[in-house]
Amino acid sequence: MSLPCLTDQFGRFLRESPIKVFVGSDRAVYYVHPGVLSACKSSTTDTRMNGSWKDAGDSAIDWTDFDSQTIECVLHYLYTGDYHVVNLAEEALISTIEDEEIHLEQSEEKQLDPNETSQSPQTDLPDGDSLMRPLTPIRACLDAGLPAEGIQTAAGAVAKKDFKDHEHNVGPSVLVHAKVYSFAHRHFFLELGKLALQRLTQILILVPCKQTCLFPYLADAIRHIYGTTPGPELQEDPARKLLSQYVAINYTDLTGEELDKLAVEGAEFMVDLLSKLARQINDLTTKTREFQMILKDKEEELQRARQEIQECESANMKKSDWDL
């Protein structure tokens, strides 16, 4: 969806009667113009407005499986071609304790019984060739890449703002971007999904991984992505790749109770993580061998230098004896 093309049509859009949209478990009501919903071609909303379901276009849309904050980001994008995570810093300042209590309750509900882990779906392990490849840096992890920063982009500006407010804003932003990506993936909003991944990538690059503000939101983002996207038997999901890659690269800084819970809960995430850790170990092993070879060469050079010095000293001593 091109923003200039979309804004050129706002006059027509605003003459249309809005459609009711139900959002979240409380079925909050939003009103959205049909032209805006159909602007993202090949999306589910475009099909709803113009495809075989066109006759049902006047009926309410059910987005109750996504919370209001996520949908407000989506609607902001539909109307403007961009979105930002609204007022997270202020909300976090007011309700930090409440959020932590909610997270603890959610973690307890999501944690699997140990006896149930054996029933997790089987996931094929990576082949030997894939384990030999070093991990791609997070900055280059996405095929879409990052937005060009020659001209300041909205994605870059928002990510940097999130970083400045990271004590209260970064963690929640990671989770919101994951939810926006999940919505875009499910409803085929391709450009929105790309933007959400770019935002998520920029935050992971900017924020120090040791910051405690990143958890538990990063863990919840991983749970959400792995719970709403297809496994590798269908396709390699870029959000799964990004998050598992990030955890593998920063594993020693992220180890702790939250990661232990993920290990118990998420079989597919752990398969992805372990395959990437194996590549990390293989890469470190290769580098260690290279350093050992370099060290061996240096030791041989040092030994030759010592031998040459000894020979020179011996020759000088013999010359001194002859002079005497």
Image (cartoon, rainbow, N blue to C red):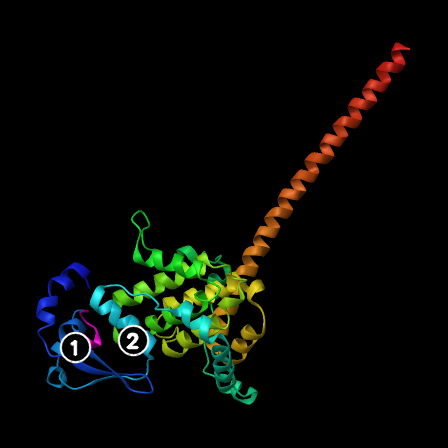
Instruction: Identify which residue, 290 or 79, lies in the foreground.
Output: 79
- How many discs appear? 2
Looking at the picture, tell me which residue is in the foreground, 184 or 215: 215
Q: Is residue 120 above or below residue 146?
A: below
Q: Measure the C-alpha gap from mark 1 to mark 2.
A: 19 Å
Q: Is 90 in front, or is 6?
A: 90
- Quick one: SS at disc 1? helix
User: The N terminus lies in which quarter of the figure?
Assistant: bottom left
Which marked residue is nearer to the observer: mark 1 or mark 2? 2
Q: Quadrant of residue 11?
A: bottom left
Q: In this rendering, would 210 be left or right of 323?
A: left
Residue 47: which disc? Answer: 1
Task: Kindly tell me whether residue 143 is visible in this rendering.
Answer: no
Region rendered in magenta: 40-46
Disc number at residue 71? Answer: 2
Tell me the amino acid under the disc marked 1. Answer: Thr
The residue lying at 54 percent from left, 73 percent from top is 259
Q: Quadrant of the C terminus?
A: top right
Q: Secondary structure at mark 2?
A: helix
